[in-house]
Amino acid sequence: MNRKLCLSAVTLGTLAGALASAALLIAAAMLPAQADAAPLPSAAEPSVPLAIVSIDNTSLRAGPKDSALQQAQLWQGDLLEVRGEKLDYLQVYDHRRERAGYVRASSVRRIGTTEADAPELLAVLRFVRDTPAAEALGVAYAAAYLQAVPAKQLTAEPFDALGTLAERLARRASARNAANTTDNKLAAHLEGVASYGVKIASFEQDGQVQLCYDGEAFRRVLAMPGATPAQRARAALALTREDCIDPALTATAREALDRWRGEVLNRLTPADWTALPEQTRNRLRLRSAGVWATLAFQQARRGEASQAAGQRALDALAGVVKTELSDDDQLDYQEAAIRVGASRWAAEPNIAGAASSATGNRPRLVSAPGQAGETCVLLVDIQHDAAKPLMRRCTWGVAWMASASASRDGTAFTVAVQPLPGWRELWLMRRSAEANGGWTLEVLPPAAGNPLGSDLGYIEAAGFVPEGEPRLLVAREARVEGRSTRRFEVTKLGALDLDKSASSPQLLAMFQRWQDPAWKRGSVSLR
């Protein structure tokens, strides 16, 4: 094979090839070279002249003049082999499109991929990584630097920059999809980075297409011993994003992924935490709170002890310094609080609470296994045992029996039931005149949303009002279609009509007088 073509095949390879070359360089420093190893350029070998397109909508023309036929349209980050120069044009060959032609010299930047070129490539990469809308250009420079840097000088910095650029590009693309707008430039940038081996996955969520970087560069950051605490924190946050989880995953695959997310967050050592600014620590606490709340639900769903995970979620949320939250962090704080609120009973032993225990012949709530994977909630008394209960209702979710509460006269009972990690409902059992003195059950959702999508929420009983017409105090918090709400309500038990509601319990006199002290002590809604 022609030597020049051989070098071009290596240098103009995809980013996956560049990353593989970096891995080979590292291995070469520790292991003997193999005879059939792929050829790599060295300092003694001449480097193929290369150029990176720096301006979007650059024309690749058939001749060195503006009136020449346009062969193709080039975009930021496209890599070209330089084969000559004429007037103000460079004669180039685009290996990805398999087209030759001429481009204006002012529209591209010449680069080298030898060891001597590495410092200059890294300097440009550092500048571009924080430049909005220049992600494709930055990915091209990252690939060039990884090709040029010697194995012994390779650090986590280029992988950190590469991951940051790819993630930001995916976020931009997702925002465009949410706005239902098209952007040819953005589409070209996505196609360009894909040619370097950057994998950006897409999936549908709530009727919109979500794009996410697969995180390969961030995984390498965590695997490199020389990574700084800031780099490791960025990698952990990027790899554990909740909005980048494919909703089509099976329950088993989702649980395995959540366990892996917890392991990623655990890789940050106490020394890492100490070296990080408070804002970054807040973001890690919020992410940890959401992850461990989800794990607590999954553990309880399998019948395993969930108290440690539930308490860890509560501690992470409680550790957030609210004065160090940015506007974007406030949204993440609300989401984390809802996730923790939905699973907060995991921190308690999942047994029937004292409020639902029998006194004399008064009923009480107990739980019993149903079909495989089911939990049944039974209303029993002295005359009606578990074999013939007053009422029986089963769920595939988690019935948090520690949340069970009863009205003073024993005619109404509530229990929190969580069917999904970020969604908790309230079961209300009450004696009803319409049922001839029998019992009816109402399922109260936190909001009118889609829990199978991205909507989150929880509802909890805050106490009963024993005087006058029986009433139930309720606290709701939800995020539906991206909007968060938190309400405190007084509901009439007879017809379940809303009596009063407010954004704060301090605005409702019945909350001030009749709220359950246990609810006030443990509820996340009062944060």
Image (tube, rainbow, N blue to C red):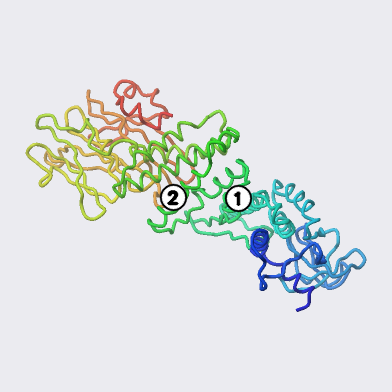
- Say which element carries label 1: loop
- Left or right, 460 with respect to 36, comes to left
Residue 195 shows up from this direction: no
Give the residue displayed 46% in from the left and 39% down from the top: 484
- Sequence order check: which comes first, mark 1 or mark 2? 1
Q: Where is residue 344, by image quadrant? A: top left
Give the answer, above or below, for where 217 lies relative to 279: below
| Viewer-nearest residue: 121 or 188 | 121
Q: CA distance from mark 1 to mark 2?
A: 23 Å
Give the answer, above or below, for where 475 lies relative to 239: above
Residue type, label 1: Met
| Viewer-nearest residue: 108 or 111 | 111
Q: Quadrant of the N terminus?
A: bottom right
Residue lying furthest front in this view? 32
Whole-percent x and y of residue 34?
Answer: 66, 70
Q: Which residue is mark 2?
A: 258
Residue type, label 2: Asp
Please identify, in this view, whether the residue under mark 1 or under mark 2 is nearer the observer: 1
Whole-percent x and y of residue 203?
Answer: 51, 59
| Residue 254: image tag | none
Residue lying furthest right in this view? 87
- Say which element carries label 2: helix
Q: Which residue is mark 1?
A: 224
